[in-house]
Amino acid sequence: MKFEMIDGLLTITLDLISSSVFAVALLMFGYFIRRKVNFFEKYCFPAPVIGGFAFALLALVFHITGAASFKLDTTLQTPFMLAFFTTVGLGGSFALLKAGGKALIIYLVACWVLAILQNGFGVGLASILGLHPLMGVMAGAVSLEGGHGAAATFGPEAEAMGAYGAAAVAIASATFGLIAGNLTGGPIARRLITKNKLEIKVSKVDGLSSYMDKITQQETEEKVTSKGFLFSMLIIGLLMLLGVAASDWIRALKIPNFFIPGYVGAMFGAILLRNVNDKFQFIKLNTKIINLISEVSIGMFLSFAMMSLRIWDLASLAVPLLIILFLQVALLIVLTYFVLFRLLGRDYDAAVMCAGMLGHGLGATPNAVANMGAVCEHYGLRSNKAFTIVPLCGAVLIDLVALPCISLFLGIFGG
């Protein structure tokens, strides 16, 4: 760590080690604050967002007052990002689609369609409001369906394409979405239940339930060992290398308006490996270790992304951004209330899943679970169908289409 005067301003420079330690400290601070402050716990705010955003606010104060500036070494942000999306791919088993049946397919396709609609709607609104089209993508599926992880991933890419302030817009939109998703999910589900006078009963999902029971039993039997951890890291590392190599190869082809980021390539490589391995069982994938690596990777990635956020970039974008976000919320409410509920069967399970859609369609999967939990607690009956299908789609399967869709919009409107 160095302290020096540059152009009359105190500049605090953190090297790779200092920045990494600081990122871990902010992550742990976020966990502490979330445990102590009910607001953050209620709205399912990720710990790295809390800790990193607290530092970003401090940096904003220093920027406004001219007291100091920070230079951070976020070199490890990209490897952590790659590792996280690779672990997401390793969870993408196609056997889930077969086991989930019609309801899972309908819900998943709805998630994929929503990603396209949110991006298209955002681009249109941004153009009307005189903003760079990529700002609409940042306030679309990137931050809403994608959450803070996708916001921190795609924001810097959009800035590199000329959308100045895109990183701050994406993070702010994701934060707005977390709150909006929780505020709308429960009330909309209860409205559907009361207006349609639904019978409070649930349907069975035998195939999916038995499949998930098998997975749960497998995870219970798995052990975390140093050898198993290193082997999992090796598999993830190789997939990361292949993803980056594939991305570089595609970029070298110079196809107009088309590119595949390294993390998308790594994710699809991981999906391919997972499903081939499900059939032939040529290696042992330890789900417990992979999930551990996933949690650490997303925590560190988001902590790095948040601590380097420039909040002051939002100053001139606040009003048009709020207009886009409120209209995005209205769009999802309309689609959920009038379309998705009917497609899912117009019953109690469908209403609960609608609460989940609003949770992760605007925020994140934990918001979806919180919404569904509140509805089921209110009516005294848990919808196992909803609690199985929604997290699977919102946390894993949605990215099969959502991430390539985002990349496509970046390629089209970032030129």
Image (tube, rainbow, N blue to C red):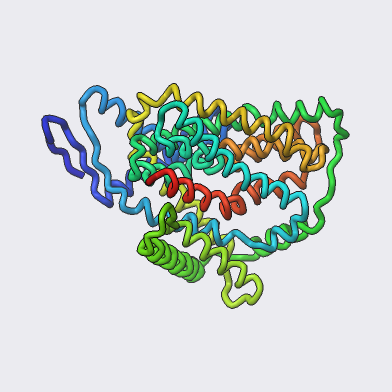
For image coordinates 47% across by 28% down, the residue present is 128
Q: Nearer the viewer, residue 283 or 288?
A: 283
Residue 35 picture location, percent across and down: 52, 35
For image coordinates 86% across by 39% down, the residue present is 201
- Quarter of the figure with the N terminus: top left
- Inspect this view and state whether residue 174 appears: no
Question: On the picture, is 13 further left or further right than 106?
Answer: left
Q: Nearer the viewer, residue 404 or 37?
A: 404
The quarter of the displayed image where residue 238 is located: bottom left
Residue 220 picture location, percent across and down: 65, 61
For image coordinates 56% across by 37% down, the residue present is 363
- Inspect this view and state whether residue 405 appears: yes
Question: On the picture, is 321 further left or further right than 360?
Answer: left
Question: On the picture, is 80 further left or further right than 122?
Answer: left
Question: On the picture, is 147 further left or further right than 113?
Answer: left
For residue 187, above or below residue 135: above
For residue 153, above or below residue 287: above
Q: Nearer the viewer, residue 144 or 17?
A: 144
* Residue sticking out furthest to the front: 256
The quarter of the displayed image where residue 91 is located: bottom right
Count of marks placed on residues? 0
For image coordinates 15% across by 31% down, the residue present is 9
Residue 203 picture location, percent across and down: 84, 46
Residue 216 picture location, percent across and down: 68, 59
Q: Nearer the viewer, residue 18 or 331?
A: 331
